[in-house]
Structures are given as structure tokens and as C-alpha cells.
Image (cartoon, rainbow, N blue to C red):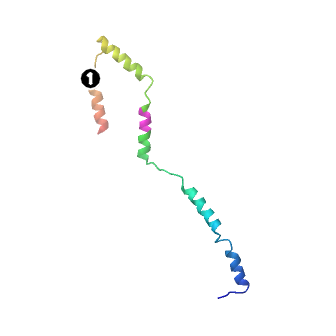
């Protein structure tokens, strides 16, 4: 079957180059490069856990001094425990859990 006339020429010109294998391969390569990147989406819970983990890694500046002072008091036999304060903190901790 042979198509002739100006409409056939127009159609042939319109599709020329669109099936060029090199152009198609270049487009496929560009799309493949775009898909090669890795993406990750973390849940809010995971983000919170990461923040908590980072906060736990940093020690307060005065913590070492407090520990040293308590050690010195224990070794000297001068460390006294306030049972009332310990009990209050325990009850407060249970209230926060519930």
C-alpha cells in the first residue's frame, strides 16, 4: 500500500526523528539517572527517637562534678539520704507513668 499526497508527506515529517533509537536511549538514560537516587522518609516517632538518642549522648556539664561530690561524700561517710525526698520522687514518677 502506498500513500501519496501532501498529507502523507506531512505525516511522515511529523514522525521523523521520534523513533530515533539514539534519542530514545538518551531519554531512557536520563530517566534512569533520575531514578538512581535513594530516598528515605522517617516517621515522626523515629525522628523523636533520634532526638532522644542524641540528647542522651550529651552529658550535662555539671553532671561529672555532681558525681564526684557524691563519691567524696560517700567515701567520707557524710552522704545522707533523705527518705522523704526519695519517696516523693518515686510517687511523682509513678504518677507520670500512669
Q: Residue at x 31, y 13 (%)?
A: 75
Q: Residue at x 28, y 35 (%)?
A: 94
Q: Quadrant of the N terminus?
A: bottom right
Q: Is residue 31 left or right of residue 89?
A: right
Vertically, is 97 above or below 73? below
Q: Find disc 1 in the rendering and name its residue.
A: 84
Q: Position of residue 28 (x, y in %)?
A: 59, 63
Query: Under tag 1, what secondary structure?
Result: helix
Residue farthest to the right? Answer: 6
Q: Quadrant of the C terminus?
A: top left
Residue farthest to the bottom? Answer: 1
Q: Quadrant of residue 76?
A: top left
Q: Residue at x 54, y 54 (%)?
A: 36
Vertically, is 26 above or below 8? above
Q: Position of residue 12 (x, y in %)?
A: 69, 79
Residue farthest to the front? Answer: 22
How many numbered marks does the figure carry?
Answer: 1
Magenta segment includes 29: no
Report the predominant secondary structure element of the magenta stretch.
Answer: helix
Vertically, is 65 above or below 14? above
**Start-end of magenta stretch:** 51-56
Q: Position of residue 47 (x, y in %)?
A: 44, 43
Q: Residue at x 73, y 86 (%)?
A: 5
Magenta segment includes 54: yes
Q: Quadrant of residue 72?
A: top left
Q: Is residue 97 left or right of residue 52?
A: left
Q: Position of residue 6 (x, y in %)?
A: 74, 84
Q: Is residue 21 left or right of residue 36?
A: right
Amino acid at each position: 500500500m502506498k500513500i501519496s499526497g501532501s498529507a502523507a508527506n506531512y505525516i511522515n515529517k511529523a514522525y521523523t526523528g521520534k523513533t530515533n533509537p539514539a534519542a530514545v536511549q538518551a531519554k531512557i538514560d536520563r530517566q534512569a539517572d533520575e531514578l538512581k537516587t535513594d530516598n528515605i522518609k522517617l516517621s515522626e516517632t523515629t525522628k523523636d527517637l533520634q532526638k532522644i538518642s542524641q540528647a542522651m549522648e550529651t552529658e550535662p556539664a555539671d553532671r561529672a562534678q555532681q558525681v564526684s561530690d557524691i563519691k567524696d561524700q560517700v567515701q567520707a561517710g557524710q552522704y545522707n539520704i533523705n527518705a522523704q525526698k526519695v519517696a516523693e520522687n518515686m510517687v511523682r514518677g509513678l504518677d507520670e507513668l500512669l
